[in-house]
Amino acid sequence: MNRKLFLAWLQLTREKARLLVALAGIAFAVILMFMQLGFQAALFESATRVHQSINADVVLINPRSRALISMNNFSRRRLYQALGFDGVESINSVYVGLGTWKSSQTQRDRAILVLGIDPTRTTLHIPEINQNLDKLKLDDVAILDRVSRPEFQPFIAEVAQGKVITPEINGRKIKVVGLFTVGSSFGSDALLITSEVNFLRIFKTREAGEINIGLIKLKPNTNIERITQAIKTNLPQDIQVLTHDEFVEFEKTYWQKNTAIGFVFTLGTIMGFIVGSVIVYQVLYTNVSDHLAEYATLKAMGYKDTYLLLMVFQEALILGFLGYIPGFAITLGLYDLTKKATSLPMAIDIGRSLMVLILTIFMCFISGVIAVRKLQAADPADIF
């Protein structure tokens, strides 16, 4: 085995320029797969941060709701009805709206997601929001996500210095008096949180009795699945009842299956795999073709096809590992650059690293399988 590995290495390094070009191509494929998978993971993470932090065991939404950026209303009465079920400790609600941010400094419109919460209660498990609840009780006051898109950073810097900025949201002037950290997403440029009263002032056509998200907190040691099923069975079908985890999956499913974004990232990963496969195949095929006489000589000396095939597969694995290392290193820098430029949670984890490594090895293996077909046809009698 060591001898085959040594021969495989010698074959690859015989023409160093060709090897470097091949490794560059494989590294590019690795980077492409890493970036596509990273964008997809960042999409899901940023899109569900609010969902993950919601203080609820059971969530009620309108069945026609598609995602946080596209929530339909339903009657608050359904939430009060849920309070009557055994095991329910408390209820709460959230208003959600997609508004337009305009500042006197830029006079440009920006899409901003606005949440209206009860400032007397803990709606989200985000300390910075809960520390500002007393401020949200005041008229026309809101707090802004500090990890919003770069276009909002000048305003965020002013608030961080203790200044109060007064942009217009849907034509109504508000005061931004504090910051919190959640992160931007593909659905909106920024996130703004205010009180329920202020939300209804910003969105003038909304009614107080029509909410977007109903939050149900259960008593300790209560069976969540049992209560969820009981609410589903006994309340009218004009609401959708979800556990907390199902609410997170509800958002992920929308971005993965119902938007072009999820498809594009999946397609990008596949394209990276195909590009890498073609590059490795071309290198191996050329290598086999250039050394066909040597392979035929080995066969004439009594070496079996299995020996030669394993040597080609080892070449494929060497290419895969050597191409993966620089691809991984470059990806670290690109992830950091993307995170700073977009505020998306781009980070490499062990699972994704192993996935790309496995894809790279599999990519090289497939290329090796195709390339050795020429080697199998090498007949010493034909060559000589």
Image (cartoon, helix red, strand yellow):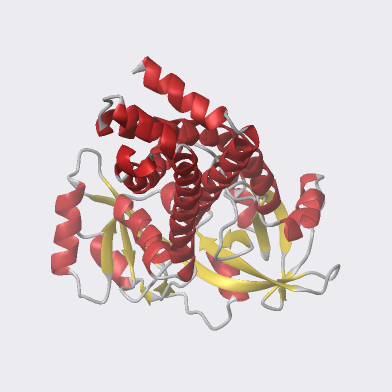
In the image, taking residue 208 as reference, residue 215 lies left or right, namely: left
Residue at far top of view: 2
In the image, taking residue 316 as reference, residue 25 lies left or right, namely: right
As drawn, 41 above or below 187 = above
| Residue closest to the eye, 94 or 349 | 349
| Residue closest to the eye, 152 or 13 | 13
Q: In which quarter of the image is the C terminus?
A: top left
As drawn, 296 above or below 370 = above
State whether residue 154 appears in this view.
yes
User: Which residue is pictured at 36% across the width and 47% down the height?
Assistant: 374
Give percent across and percent down for residue 52: 42, 48
Residue at far right of view: 105
In the image, taking residue 138 as reference, residue 351 lies left or right, namely: left
Give percent across and percent down for residue 8: 44, 27
Give percent across and percent down for residue 75: 35, 75
Residue at far bottom of view: 205
User: Which residue is pictured at 47% across the width and 70% down the height?
Assistant: 260
User: Which residue is pictured at 40% across the width and 48% down the height?
Assistant: 55
Q: Quadrant of the N terminus?
A: top left
As drawn, 53 above or below 188 = above
Residue 108: image quadrant is: bottom right
State whether residue 86 appears in this view.
no
Give percent across and percent down for residue 378: 33, 42
Residue 326: image quadrant is: top right
| Residue closest to the eye, 202 or 112 | 112
Q: How many labels does the image show?
A: 0
